[in-house]
Image (tube, rainbow, N blue to C red):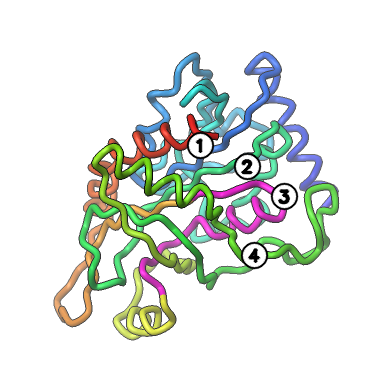
Amino acid sequence: MEDSLLQCGNAADYIRRKTGGAEFSVGIILGSGLGDLAEIISDKTVIPYSDIPGFSQCSADGHKGRLITGRLGGKMVCAMQGRFHCYEGYEMGQVTLPVRVMRLLGVQCLFVSNASGGINSAFKVGDIMVITDHINLLPNPLVGPNADSFGPRFPDMLNAYDPELIEKAFKVAAENGIALRKGVYLATSGPSYETQAEYDWFKRMGADAVGMSTVPEVIVARHAGIRVFGVSVVSSAPHDTAADYFIDGEEVIKAAAEAAGKLTVLFTKLIESL
């Protein structure tokens, strides 16, 4: 634990030096195909993950592997163009280290996004689902000695996704002609997509979308007292009965990218409201 906390401190110190000691109120983690949102950040500083002490490297398609800091929606933000996944071989401490670094940089609100598979039969490819809750089938990132300097041993996960921000999101969407869904996100380890039996089980569990990320970051954020707003872009359709259904990873990224413009408006307007 001491080594991990030292890594967090070293990474935060490095980012402060690169950004002239800037403090950030908002963190953003952009998933597969969604990294272009970071390009509209003004007064930006771009830092490759390879330069930041303790940061891992992205190997997943659609993840650029850069931290972009600057101003968005009138706030100072630090945005991750790509995240780290358990399926890449990283331990949970590596996957979630950036969230704790953000907390050391002053972040009080975290916006997370991902590309997901639709489970709810009412969903279609391209839909944006506001995450209202999650089901975690990944290892819990808080297992092990507690990081007391960040949060309590047993953090509450009720309302992990901030109800006030969810309410604001639907208001912003209505004002800007953006259709939103809402639902429960289920996280698996990947990298294989779900079998039909698993898919059916997830649906019975109450999941509306499934993916391979996000939940570990949310747990660590809530442990540290950071408010969270999350969205999933539905990038593959529900496949209730189609025996010949095939999920193409490139199509997943393409579908997410096509929704990025709407997501940019939603995130920017929400950040303005903080």
Q: Position of residue 105 (x, y in %)?
A: 70, 31
Q: Quadrant of residue 182?
A: bottom left
Residues at marks 2 and 1 touching, judged by CB atoms closer than 8 Å: yes
241 vs 204, nearest the viewer: 204
Q: Is residue 118 above or below residue 266?
A: below
Question: Considering the image in quadrants, where does the C terminus appear?
Answer: top right
Q: Which mark is residue 153?
A: none
The amino acid type of the residue labelled 2 equals Pro
Mark 1: which amino acid?
A: Met
Dot placed on the residue nearer the N-terminal end, 2 or 1: 1
- State yes or no: residue 217 in magenta: yes
Report the residue marked by disc 1: 80
Are circles 3 and 4 on residues that touch, CB within 8 Å?
no
Residue that mark 2 sits on: 98
Q: Which residue is mark 4?
A: 157
- According to the image, label 3 marks what residue? 224
In three-dimensional space, the C-alpha distance between marks 2 and 3, rounded to whole angstroms, equals 12 Å
Q: Residue at x 47, y 61 (%)?
A: 132
Counting residues from the start of the chain, the first of labels 2 and 3 encountered is 2
| Mark closer to the chain start, 3 or 4 | 4
Judge whether 155 appears above or below 22 on screen: below
The magenta stretch spans which residues?
A: 207-229
Residue 166 falls within the magenta-colored stretch: no
Task: Give percent across and percent down for residue 22.
Answer: 66, 19
For residue 94, above or below residue 172: below
